Amino acid sequence: MRFKSDRQRKAVMAKLRSGYYRQNYGLNTDSSSMYARLRGEGKSDEEAQYQVYKSRGIIKDNKTKVTKVKDKPTGIKEFDKPVLTEREVNLLMRRINAGKIKPSDLSKIKRIYDGEGIPLTPEQSEKGRRYLYNLWKTPRGKERKNNPFGYREEDIIDNLREIRLRDVYSERGNFYVPLYEAISKQGNSMEYYVSGGKISIVG
């Protein structure tokens, strides 16, 4: 973790240790989450939390100032639905990247706060499956030389049940993309996002 001053470092660390961010924004700690992956890589609890909250835009540019969740509507409730269409996901991302909705506001949706995610429509899940399968194999069924998946991911794609919107993710700190979870019929899952035409498996 890099900070502009020792005072800033102490302020952020104090909030991480006290559970301030967990209480206000939630933290998914199940086995397929970004937090669990970072812990598995040997990151400390504070470092893993820091990376998760930074990717969600809650900790921005090493600044400690965090806007608390307000009671007044922010427009996020419009997306608190049993399923989301492609149009709704695209609209949500446009509003987040335009600054009309804060990434941290997603924690106001119970299914995202609880780590369950919001299912996409069956049509959108199938479109996602075809996209993932095309990265794996050619139209003739041959494995691509640049196949980004391992055996676990291939099995999930082969037996896909649904795709859910889990959260949003930012590599550059100011542009967000959807963080999806693909779930197989056996209950196995993987988290991924697509940025710049490249897929990244993060859980």
Image (cartoon, rainbow, N blue to C red):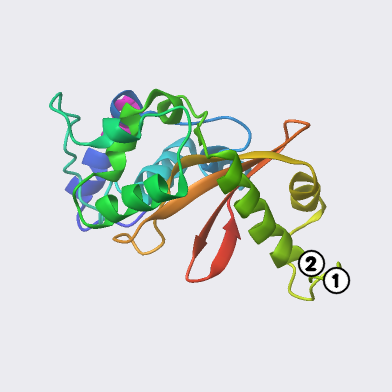
Residue furthest to the bottom in view is 145
Q: Nearer the viewer, residue 168 or 85?
A: 85
The magenta segment is 14-21
Secondary structure mostly taken by the magenta-highlighted segment of the chain: helix
Seen at 31% across and 31% down, the residue is 21
112 left or right, relative to 76: right
Q: Amino acid at mark 1?
A: Arg
Image-quadrant location for residue 181? top right
Q: Amino acid at mark 2?
A: Lys
In the displayed structure, 161 sits above or below 57; it is above
Q: Which residue is mark 2?
A: 137
Describe residue 109's horizontal placement relative to residue 123 as left or right.
left
Residue at image coords 49%, 31%: 28
Q: Is residue 31 visible?
A: yes
State the CA–CA distance, disc 2 to disc 1.
8 Å
Question: In the rendered structure, does residue 47 fall within the stretch colored magenta?
Answer: no
Q: Please state which of residues 181 and 47 is positioned toward the viewer in this rendering.
A: 181
Compared with 145, 133 (above or below) is above
Q: Relative to 157, does residue 15 appear above or below in the rendering?
A: above
Q: Quickly name the residue at label 1.
A: 140
Can the viewer see residue 148? no
**Quarter that holds the C terminus:** top right
Of residues 123 and 153, the one drawn nearer to the viewer in this rendering = 123
Indicate the position of residue 184 as horizontal and vertical percent values.
Answer: 73, 38
Q: Position of residue 79 (x, y in %)?
A: 34, 35
Which numbered tag is attached to residue 21? none
Camera-near label (2 vs 1) is 1
Q: Is residue 19 magenta?
A: yes
Residue 139 placed where, x, y %? 79, 70
Q: Are marks 2 and 1 in contact (CB under 8 Å)?
A: yes
